[in-house]
Amino acid sequence: MVDTVVAKALLGRDEKIVRVDLGARSYDIKIGRGLLEGAGAEIAAVMPGARLAVVADETVAGLHLKAFSQSLKAAGLEHTAITVPAGESTKCFREFERLCDEVLAARLERGDAVVALGGGVVGDLTGFVASAVRRGMAFIQVPTTLLAQVDSSVGGKTGINSRHGKNLIGAFHQPALVLADTAILDTLPLRDFRAGYAEVAKYGLLGDADFFAWLETNWQAVFAGGAERDEAVARSCQAKADVVAADELESGRRALLNLGHTFGHALESAVAYETERLVHGEGVSIGMMLAHEFSQRLGLIGEDTVERVHKHLSDVGLPVRVQDIPGQLPPAETLMDIIAQDKKVSRGALTFILTRGIGEAFVEKGVDPALVSDFLKEKLEA
Amino acid sequence: MVDTVVAKALLGRDEKIVRVDLGARSYDIKIGRGLLEGAGAEIAAVMPGARLAVVADETVAGLHLKAFSQSLKAAGLEHTAITVPAGESTKCFREFERLCDEVLAARLERGDAVVALGGGVVGDLTGFVASAVRRGMAFIQVPTTLLAQVDSSVGGKTGINSRHGKNLIGAFHQPALVLADTAILDTLPLRDFRAGYAEVAKYGLLGDADFFAWLETNWQAVFAGGAERDEAVARSCQAKADVVAADELESGRRALLNLGHTFGHALESAVAYETERLVHGEGVSIGMMLAHEFSQRLGLIGEDTVERVHKHLSDVGLPVRVQDIPGQLPPAETLMDIIAQDKKVSRGALTFILTRGIGEAFVEKGVDPALVSDFLKEKLEA
Ligand SMILES: NC(=O)c1ccc[n+]([C@@H]2O[C@H](COP(=O)([O-])OP(=O)(O)OC[C@H]3O[C@@H](n4cnc5c(N)ncnc54)[C@H](O)[C@@H]3O)[C@@H](O)[C@H]2O)c1
Ligand SMILES: NC(=O)c1ccc[n+]([C@@H]2O[C@H](COP(=O)([O-])OP(=O)(O)OC[C@H]3O[C@@H](n4cnc5c(N)ncnc54)[C@H](O)[C@@H]3O)[C@@H](O)[C@H]2O)c1
Ligand SMILES: [Zn+2]
Ligand SMILES: [Zn+2]
């Protein structure tokens, strides 16, 4: 059990609460199966009398908006629903402008709130809108993908993409409340569930060996949707919340969350973000394998550790080798160029998250690019 | 003399410094004649080695960009200049997107800075861009209008307009440094100088009777550009900085800065923001007169106080009566509707900044709309 997670009975359901500690901007993440039904009451408790603008993508709106609306009505909360197309390309200036206009057209005032009902795309876009309308409206997240529940809804990063790259325009804007209904994940395609699971495994690998061992034993129940799913989501949120509380504006420790992400982003970029070939969590899974193999190459960990990570990620069905990506990949030189353009570079040396063992990741700022390049060449030829 | 303003000799020039006290986000406003020449050195001192994106409107670029660029070059600072059209309509989504793109295209990284060289329009737009690119770049203001030097560059409010109203989209984003060269105001058209002066007089009227008396004696020198101009800018910045430090996110005391603005905004809106008829500072001047006359009507101040305010504002050439606005105005009912739609309304009662004497403004939340309506009717017919 996560010690700071409180289990309580609400309407006969089990609910876990992770508190994100940010002084005056602190808030709760509530996690539980079937939480959506009581979402209106939860929101009314935090923002009595608020009027809401609810943003959802078309897929999620079709599946879950009706239940959410009913719960809001039951709690006496007026709301306007706004839908956006599903998919990453929705995180753009045009949708940002349209949503700002629609939120204003709904005559929301200070004291009202903007709600994101959806995955990371809707959460990131809507959060940025909430940060900007009237220079900051209250924001509530109802994450509907595993990735959003364990990662994007925690930490306050919001934003859209620019033609110069992903997530380059945005704001830090903390929500007032996060409601993660784990039953809502039952409708999520398996591939998206797996992709989110890569981030769950990441929390174990970067800083919690016990959690990783627990996942090795319990991952099937997490996928199946039992109490273990709630537990995995809560422990993941807690792990991210701890790092975020220590480092809200992302200067130091928060970098550990990038375990597997330098390689992962390079691979996503190499396939031009074509999600048919590779989604983010899959890139992270391969990236985490590469980070472990590279750590082994540097003598930081042994073969057995690499094997253990490899086994778990393949057991759950995640890709673990660059060769698992369908189609042709660019040569190592191109991947190196992408890595060098990444913001985590400083004057020649590369910054990587490496590891000394399961749960023992650390930030290494002085990685020699030549070593990485040789390593990548081998991996691409393997 | 303002006690917290430090006069020091820099390159033989007198410079005043107003410190804006916001904890980790504290910064200096430097005020002085000819400061532009040493601007590069000042910026390099705060952000050594930073690369800069400098935003200016076409008018200001034509007049002052060359001198500013030279000063940056002399200090060894690399920069990219970006121009936008002059005028309020530049505060829009399209320019926001374009500037974000251009700042990214200039390959600015964290640790680099975005600079606004201009009036309130360029300051507000550029500040919002700085807040959003990479979720927050350092921001430097070089205000070139009196209004920007004494008002919009202090306090961290940034933003753009939406079709639902002015300044409805934006962020709170504090600058790292503000450089107010009072000589740069020599090229400002007299009408714009006067409009900015309305805000200077406002600081005296809302909380500093001594400053208002000082202005009555010294306003000609302020307009002429002597040491008195620096003094007036510094005291104004200090007045706003004090309020902002006490109330960064605008919940209570900061409302005093709206003296004259409820009526003023209604008039601006009534002429559809046609600046040929009325610019913001002119609306504020008439609005301040109305606030004083309304306070007199409520028995809060006497005829003599109203007369004193009237004399000073007309002496400097500012409009003081609704009849000073060229063209037809809508009836009182329409103005009341505009006031009621204003965000400063709460359930029936109106919030106004009223006064008990020169330098003694206060926030009154329970103003009866019927009283205001009758008052406005008389004023429109007078
Ligand atoms: N802000 C952060 O800190 C942060 C962290 C990680 C990732 N992100 C961002 O998150 C985004 C990815 O998030 P994502 O993976 O959730 O993508 P997503 O929001 O696009 O959701 C993936 C797909 O699942 C569908 N979907 C969502 N919930 C569903 C449900 N319950 N049932 C059925 N279908 C459902 C969506 O319509 C979409 O097609 C990226 O844009 C990434 O940049 C942000
Ligand atoms: N952020 C805030 O707290 C705040 C406060 C008050 C007003 N504002 C905003 O400020 C804006 C108005 O600012 P403004 O009055 O400075 O308008 P502005 O920026 O449009 O400048 C007025 C005109 O003067 C020209 N100009 C600027 N500097 C000049 C110079 N030195 N010489 C010659 N011409 C020059 C400009 O090109 C423009 O045509 C409005 O959009 C208002 O909403 C913001
Ligand atoms: Zn990730
Ligand atoms: Zn004003």
Image (spheres, coloured by chain):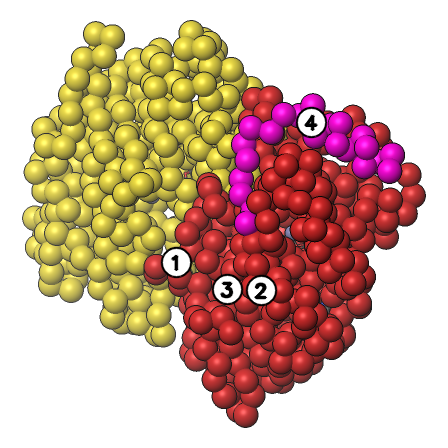
Chain colours: A yellow, B red
Between marks 3 and 2 in the image, the one whose residue lies nearer the viewer: 2
* Label 1 beta carbon less than 8 Å to ligand 2: no
Q: Nearer the viewer, residue A105 or A120?
A: A105
- The numbered disc on residue B22 is 1
The mark nearer the N terminus, 3 or 1, is 1
Badge 2 and badge 1 in a common chain: yes
Could you say whether the residue bearing mark 3 is in a helix, strand or loop?
helix
Judging by the rendered image, the residue that carries numbered circle 2 is B211
Left or right of residue B348, residue B139 in this image: left
Secondary structure state at the residue bearing disc 4:
helix
Residue A309 shows in this picture: no
Label 3 in the same subunit as label 2? yes
Q: Residue at x 15, y 21 (%)?
A: A7
As shown in the figure, which amino acid type bears the numbered disc 3?
Gln
Q: Residues within 10 Å of mark 3 (few under 14, many from 20)?
A: many
N-term-proximal mark, 2 vs 4: 2
On the same chain, marks 4 and 3? The answer is: yes
| Earlier residue among tags 4 and 3 | 3
Q: Earlier in the sequence, mark 1 or mark 4?
A: 1
Kindly identify which residue carries mark 3.
B238
Tell which of A117 and A260 is nearer to you.
A117
Mark 2 falls within which chain?
A: B
Residue drawn at point x = 8 percent, y = 55 percent = A302
Report the chain holding disc 4: B
Eye-nearest disc, 2 or 1? 2
Q: Which residues are magenta?
A: B360-382
Q: Separation of disc 2 and disc 4 at Cα?
A: 31 Å
**Which residue reaches farthest bottom?**
B12
Is residue A247 in view?
yes
Which residue is the site of mark 4?
B371
